[in-house]
Amino acid sequence: MLTRSQTLAAGLMAVSLFTLPALAAPGTRDGAAPPSRTERMEMHRQRACADAPAWLAGWLGFAETKLGITATQRTAWDSFARELRASQGPMQALCSTQPQPAKAEGTAPAKPDPVQRLRGQEDRLSAELESVKLRRGAVEQLLPQLTAEQRDRFAELPPMAMLGRPGPHGAMHGGPHRAPGR
């Protein structure tokens, strides 16, 4: 009869035998090569573009609850939320106009030349600047409608600047943030 520790050791060995091949060659279980860095970046960009409205909706719900918006502040808050949603327009327009990298079956996608990369960076920064200006206007209109305590809470909210913005590797910023002091 096996002792408890022997049974546990045998179980762990059995599990490791099944999982070790999967860990040794990630992405090749079905014989297909894992996606290239460019393909992964494009997948992240597509997901980020698709998820931006959901990130903003989550941020607005969190902010509204955290601030404790009152019935008298409802009109100002609804206007703020509407303007914040509109601020995503430039980035969403950029998402819908960015070309997909062409790739023939079995070949690596062509890398953009330096001028194309800089042009793309300039387009992203221009769209982001336009979004920031729209968000700033929305905040400037909302803050006078809030109490001093609500303004302090607003200042502690996760950064709005990162909402709906593709990150350095195509990932969308705006995910979970730690509260100040944590």
Image (tube, rainbow, N blue to C red):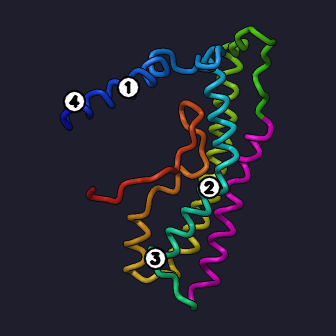
User: Left or right: 42 with respect to 19?
Assistant: right
**Near-viewer residue (65 or 131):** 65
**Which secondary structure dominates the residues rendered in magenta?**
helix
Mark with earlier residue (4, 3): 4
* Label 4 sits on residue: 6
Task: Determine if the magenta segment contains residue 90.
Answer: yes
Mark 1: secondary structure = helix
Question: Which class describes the residues within 10 Å of circle 3: few (<14), some (14-19), or many (20+)?
Answer: some
Which segment is the magenta one? 72-97
Mark with earlier residue (2, 4): 4
Mark 2: secondary structure = helix
* Label 1 sits on residue: 14
Q: CA distance from mark 2 to mark 1?
A: 58 Å
Query: Could you say where residue 170 lies in the image, as x and y percent from the top left?
Result: 60, 33
* Label 2 sits on residue: 133
**Amino acid of disc 4:** Gln
Mark 3: secondary structure = helix
Task: Tell me the residue at 50%/74% (across/down).
Answer: 143
The image quadrant where one finds the C terminus is bottom left
User: Left or right: 9 with respect to 89?
Assistant: left
* Label 3 sits on residue: 67
Task: Tell me the residue at 62%/71% (across/down).
Answer: 80
Q: CA distance from mark 4 to mark 3?
A: 56 Å
**Amino acid of disc 2:** Lys
